[in-house]
Structures are given as structure tokens and as C-alpha cells.
Amino acid sequence: MSTQSFDPNNAQNLIEIEKQFAVKAVEHAQTYWNLLEKVPPRALKLTKLDDEIYEHTMSAFPEFNEDNHAHLVKLDEDWLKSDIGKKKWREFCQVYEKKVKDYNFGSLIRTDARQEYGEANTIFVTRIQFYAIEIARNRLGLNDGAHEIAKADAEKERLKKEKAAKKNGTS
């Protein structure tokens, strides 16, 4: 295929490439959830640019500061996908093109910071959007509840494995 006639806006996704991106996005989400389990969110550092990303996020999106950060606690997917939302995020993301590796890779993010990852609570965003939102959530204490949920889930899993090991005669 000639790259001169390639139009990315009308390109069809190759199934195998889509699958690879999906696997990477799920692995990234699992890794982040494991981090939330082990590290108090306010102490979590996601990139070496966390301070810059946080300050830029909060200034570029003043709506995140309103109503006890309601727009960060519960993301509005319609707003993210609106023409205005897309324009603001596109401008925001471009700042990190040469600063953050894989800034435009796809990532899964929880729409509601008070809940864990799940089909009804997950949307697809770019990596820099993920960093921007999650760094802000962490700094503002909005992921403290998720930290407790993740710890409780890990403890349940540990007890389940322990019980299975005893049942099988190993401990």
C-alpha cells in the first residue's frame, strides 16, 4: 500500500492490531489497579512530569475544580466526545507529544473514581488523558476509596487462595 494515498481518517482497523492495542490497554489498567492496591494514591507518581501534568490539567480544565471536583470523580463521556471536549483535549495532548512516551496510546480509565474497573465503568482514552485525570484524582484524594476497594479485593483473593491451598492439603 502506498503511504501517499493512505488516509488515516478513512482507514479500516486491522483486527490483529486492534487486539494488540486492547491487550496493552487491559494490561495497563491491571497494572494501575495493582498500584492503587499497594500505594496510597496521594503518594503515587505515574510519570516524571506529574507536577507539570497536574498543573496543566487543572488550568486547562477549570471544570475539574468545580463542585468538589465532580467532573473528575465521575467523567462525562458525552463531554469528552463533544466537539468542544475533543478540541480542548487535542490541544492539551499535543503539548506532551515529545514529552511523554506513548502519549497517544489507548488506555482504559474508570469513569467513576469511586468504583473499580468494570464494563459499565470503563472508557477508552489516550494515555496522556489517563495520566491527566488519574494524577488529579490521586492528588485530590479522589482515588482513596478505590485504594481501599483494591486492597479489600486483594485480601479476598489472598484468603481464597489460602483456603484452596488448605483444601488441597498444602499450605
Image: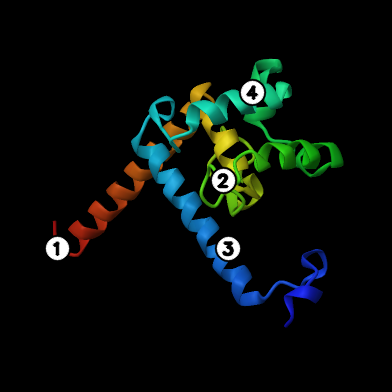
Mark pair 4, 1: CA separation: 54 Å
- SS assignment at label 1: loop
In percent of the image, x 49 and y 31: which residue is there?
50
- SS assignment at label 3: helix
Q: Is residue 12 above or below residue 86?
A: below
**Residue 85: horizontal and vertical position, in percent?**
79, 37
User: The disc labelled 3 sits on which kind of residue?
Assistant: Ala
Could you tell which of marks 3 and 1 lies nearer the N-terminus?
Answer: 3
Depth check: give the residue in front, 166 or 148. Answer: 148
Mark pair 3, 2: CA separation: 24 Å
User: The disc labelled 1 sits on which kind of residue?
Assistant: Gly
Report which residue position mark 2 lands on: 98
Report which residue position mark 3 lands on: 22
Q: What label sits on residue 169 in the rendered view?
A: 1
Mark pair 1, 2: CA separation: 55 Å
- SS assignment at label 2: loop
